Amino acid sequence: MRYCTRLHKKELLWFTWTYLLFQGLLSLLDMVAFYGLELDIVDIDYFTLRGYIMENEFKKWMKDNYSDNELADIANHGCSGGVGGMIYYRETEAIYTKYACELHEILKEYKENVGNFPDYVTDELGYFSRFTNAVVWFCAEIVAQEITQGEYISETELRG
């Protein structure tokens, strides 16, 4: 188990207990899915429940801070054109500091799927501000694409 922030003893105990509880639940869900068992006690599918438990905090932050159409803009055009809250290095450093574990999970998942890290992220490894900026922008683009698939919501859908 790795820790991304410094924790006090009480927080560490709570974190460990919560982690073990969720790991146990996820293991149970994995077993249920593997054996094709049905759970009569809940009417929710395995992947929905697993996704709910494991939802990335950075993804939640993106959903809370940007509208669907702003997310579609990020998915289609990237962050380099200017996205409020992710323009200045101080902003992206703060986001990186708060969500470092989640951002690196997104990078890890990307590498597992594609085979390598994006060049524009690895090119900035020697420069903290530029590296954190590249990581935040890259992950924002990935998350925005996951949420919206790059599709905009029309005004009639927004009103309805």
Image (cartoon, grey):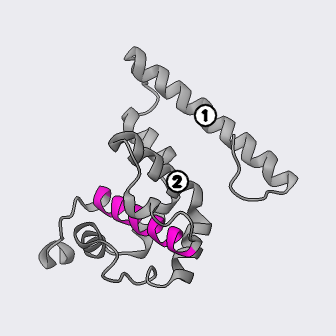
Q: Is residue 95 left or right of residue 152?
A: right
Tell me residue 89's x, y (percent).
Answer: 52, 81
Q: Residues within 10 Å of mark 1 (few under 14, many from 20)?
A: few
Q: Amino acid at mark 2?
A: His
Q: Identify which amino acid the numbered label 1 is placed on.
A: Gln
The reply to whether discs 2 and 1 touch (Cβ–Cβ < 8 Å) is no
Q: Which residues are magenta?
A: 129-146
Residue with the mark numbered 1:
23
Say if residue 102 shows up in the picture. Answer: yes
Q: Position of residue 45 (x, y in %)?
A: 36, 34
Q: Which residue lies at the image location 28% right of the left edge and 70% below the top edge?
A: 68
First in residue order: circle 2 vs circle 1: 1
Question: Camera-side residue: 31 or 5?
Answer: 5
State which quadrant residue 111 falls in: top left
Residue 1 among magenta residues: no
Residue designated by label 2: 104
